[in-house]
């Protein structure tokens, strides 16, 4: 009898230990492993759910905590990516005026600007380019202050004639010194207004023109700038007679870091971000942009911006 009683007690003990192990020790051990993963930065480790009671609640708390941490880690990664993109955008756009300043300063130093008029023109261009750089640097300072790094637009009413007239004057001078002819036609009414950020629109035009210059392969280069009337919108076309873009590459040229094979293999440097900036700015203005091109013949960039109407 006693033996039987002892046997029953041992058996109950064993069962109790097993139950304790299964119900408490194992879940606590699992939780410990999971916490260790979090400590080591692994936010992907999921605990099996389906446990009841206190243990189930503990698992659920772990899972909630893991998801919250993962969310903020992902957000941080995304923000870091934005920061890097913005810095590389600005570095990219700073290169253009710096190259011009260098070129014109050299022109002054080695006597290419040999008349007082030319010298004044060169100095004025250096001044304008320095202003562009100053604006970009101000922008960089602004970006760093702004959460989630949206481009801080400064939209205003712009008269299309005045704005593009001034732009073309400035660019024309720059192109002339590189032996490229600039033709300009503006077919919209004198009083046409658009809502745009003048600085950002300038970035768009500069980026497009700098591609036309960079990928020019003709002895007599030309760039045509046309502003067309499309009832509710204006359409800007910038066409060059450069080397053109293969049809298969055309759909990708606005993607970040995309460069056509012919460009990657050529001597011209670049990172393939110019047109992605252009597209973002145009779309942030509520417009759209596309390109047409024929290899060996030339490329045309088209973008459309809505007109401003007093009653609208
Ligand atoms: N006017 C053009 N003529 C010929 N190819 C062009 C022209 N504009 C753009 N492309 C092609 O589209 C690609 C993408 O242009 P994008 O301006 O984004 O980059 P990139 O000029 O190569 O480099 P980055 O602008 O960053 O210096 C270029 O590499 C080039 O292959
Ligand atoms: Mg470019």
Image: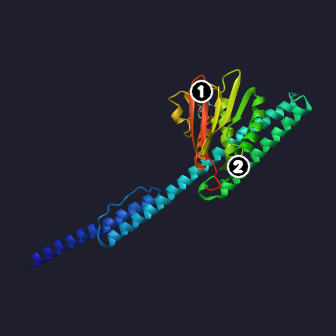
Query: Which type of secondary structure does the marked residue at label 2 adopt?
Result: strand
User: Where's the N terminus, which quadrant?
Assistant: bottom left
Q: Position of residue 198 (x, y in %)?
A: 70, 48
Mark 1 burial class by Cα count in 10 Å: few <14, some 14-19, many 20+: many
Frontmost residue, 58 versus 151? 151
Q: Which mark is residue 244?
A: 1
Frontmost residue, 88 versus 122? 122
Q: Which mark is residue 132?
A: none
Mark 2 burial class by Cα count in 10 Å: few <14, some 14-19, many 20+: some
Q: Position of residue 116 (x, y in %)?
A: 92, 33
Q: Position of residue 233 (x, y in %)?
A: 60, 44
Work out whether 9 lies above or below 257.
below
Q: Quadrant of ligand 2?
A: top right
Q: Residue at x 70, y 25 (%)?
A: 221
Query: Which type of secondary structure does the marked residue at label 1 adopt?
Result: loop
Q: Residue at x 33, y 73 (%)?
A: 54
Frontmost residue, 2 versus 251? 251
Work out which residue is located at the far right of the displayed protein and give it: 116
- Quickly name the residue at label 2: 158
Could you tell whether 195 is left or right of 134 in the image? left
- Figure quadrant of residue 227: top right
Q: Residue at x 29, y 67 (%)?
A: 51
Using the rendered image of the protein, determine whether residue 259 is visible from the camera's viewpoint: no
Q: CA distance from mark 2 to mark 1?
A: 32 Å
Using the rendered image of the protein, determine whether residue 80 is visible from the camera's viewpoint: yes
Q: Is the C-beta of the residue carrying label 1 under 8 Å from the nearest atom of ligand 1?
A: yes
């Amino acid at each position: 009898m006693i033996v039987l009683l002892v046997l029953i007690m041992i058996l109950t003990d064993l069962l109790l230990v097993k139950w304790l192990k299964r119900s408490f020790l194992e879940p606590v051990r699992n939780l410990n492993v999971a916490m260790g993963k979090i400590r080591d930065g692994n936010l992907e480790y999921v605990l099996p759910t389906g446990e009841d009671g206190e243990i189930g609640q503990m698992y659920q708390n772990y899972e909630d905590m893991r998801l919250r941490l993962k969310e903020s880690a992902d957000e941080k990664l995304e923000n870091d990516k934005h920061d890097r993109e913005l810095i590389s955008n600005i570095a990219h756009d700073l290169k253009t005026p710096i190259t011009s300043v260098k070129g014109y300063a050299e022109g002054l130093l080695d006597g290419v600007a040999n008349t007082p008029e030319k010298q004044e023109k060169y100095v004025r261009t250096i001044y304008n380019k320095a202003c562009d750089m100053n604006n970009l640097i101000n922008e960089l300072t602004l970006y760093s202050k702004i959460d989630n790094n949206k481009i801080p637009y400064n939209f205003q009413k712009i008269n299309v004639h005045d704005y593009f007239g001034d732009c073309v004057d400035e660019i024309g001078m720059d192109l002339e010194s590189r032996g490229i002819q600039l033709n300009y036609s503006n077919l919209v009414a004198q009083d046409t207004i658009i809502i745009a950020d003048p600085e950002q629109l300038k970035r768009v035009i500069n980026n497009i023109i700098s591609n036309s210059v960079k990928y020019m392969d003709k002895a007599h280069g030309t760039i045509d700038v046309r502003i067309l009337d499309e009832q509710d919108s204006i359409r800007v076309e910038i066409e060059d007679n450069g080397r053109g873009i293969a049809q298969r590459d055309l759909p990708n040229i606005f993607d970040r870091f995309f460069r056509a094979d012919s460009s990657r293999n050529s001597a011209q440097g670049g990172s393939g971000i110019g047109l992605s900036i252009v597209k973002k700015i145009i779309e942030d203005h509520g417009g759209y942009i596309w390109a047409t091109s024929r290899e060996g013949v030339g490329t045309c960039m088209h973008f459309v911006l809505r007109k401003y109407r007093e009653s609208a």
